[in-house]
Each structure stands twice: as structure tokens, then as C-alpha cells.
Amino acid sequence: MLVTKLLRRCCLFILLPMLIAFASLVFIDQVSYSGTLTFQRPLNPITIKRDHLGIPTIEGQDFKDVNYGLGFAHAQDRLWSVFFKKLLFSGRLSEAFGKSTLSIDK
């Protein structure tokens, strides 16, 4: 009986978080976004370019513009993180990613 409780706790606190972390890395790798976004701040334009890994390169005319672009890029990444975790923990990944995530949802 003690061994059974120990195995359950091991699975719950060690294996489950490892499985979730692995699944997150796999899906983030598949869904990383790339492209260019240009928007106009009150004075100067700011350009955020993302490479194939989703790493941003921010271009602006002065330090304030680049900081504004950095905040914008952080907000994009944070929004994605919140959205992904919401789907993961509610068992609804298949709504966004299709049949390949059905086993994780179950």
C-alpha cells in the first residue's frame, strides 16, 4: 500500500510535469511564428522581424522606439503563452492543433 502511494505521487509530481513540458516544447516548435510586423508609433515607425524560430529583431530610430517594440514583442509572446496554457490545462489543445493532440487532451 505504501509502495502504491509512492508510485502515484512519483507519477503525479515528476512524470506528469515532464510530459507537459515535453509536449509544450514539441508544439511550440511546430507553431513558432515568423514574419515582419511594422507599425507606426506617434513619431517613428517600428519594425519587428521574427526569424524561423520566432526570435524577434526590433528596429527603430531611437532608444524609446526600440523599447516600445520590445514591450510589444513581449506582449505577443506572453499572449501566446497564456493562450497555449489555457488550452493545455483545460484539455482543449485539439481545438487549435487538430487530431495530433487528442491523446494529450484525453
Image (cartoon, rainbow, N blue to C red):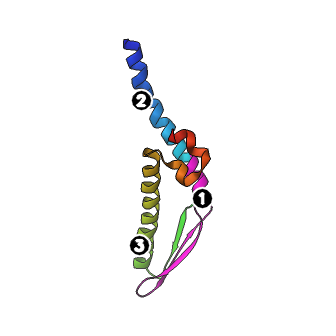
The N terminus: image quadrant: top left
Where residue 23 appears, x then y in whole percent? 54, 43
**Distance from label 1 to label 2 (Cα)?**
32 Å
Q: Residue at x 43, y 78 (%)?
A: 65
Q: The residue under label 1 is which amino acid type?
A: Leu
Compared across the picture, whether 94 is left or right of 81 comes to: right
Mark 1: few, some, or many residues within 10 Å (few <14, many ≥20)?
A: few
Q: The residue under label 3 is which amino acid type?
A: Asn
Which of the numbered marks, if any, corresponds to residue 67?
3
Using the image, determine if residue 100 lies above or below residue 45.
Answer: above
Mark 2: few, some, or many residues within 10 Å (few <14, many ≥20)?
A: few
In the picture of the structure, the residue carrying the numbered disc 2 is 12
In the picture of the structure, the residue carrying the numbered disc 1 is 53
Q: Nearer the viewer, residue 27 or 92?
A: 92
Where residue 37 appears, x then y in whole percent? 54, 74
**Distance from label 3 to label 1 (Cα)?**
21 Å
Q: Residue furthest top?
A: 1
Q: Nearer the viewer, mark 2 or mark 3?
A: 2
Q: Nearer the viewer, residue 101 or 44?
A: 101
Q: What range is drawn magenta here?
A: 26-53
How many marks the image carries: the answer is: 3
Dot 1: element: loop
Where residue 64 appears, x then y in whole percent? 39, 78
Q: Residue at x 42, y 88 (%)?
A: 43
Q: Nearer the viewer, residue 91 or 27?
A: 91
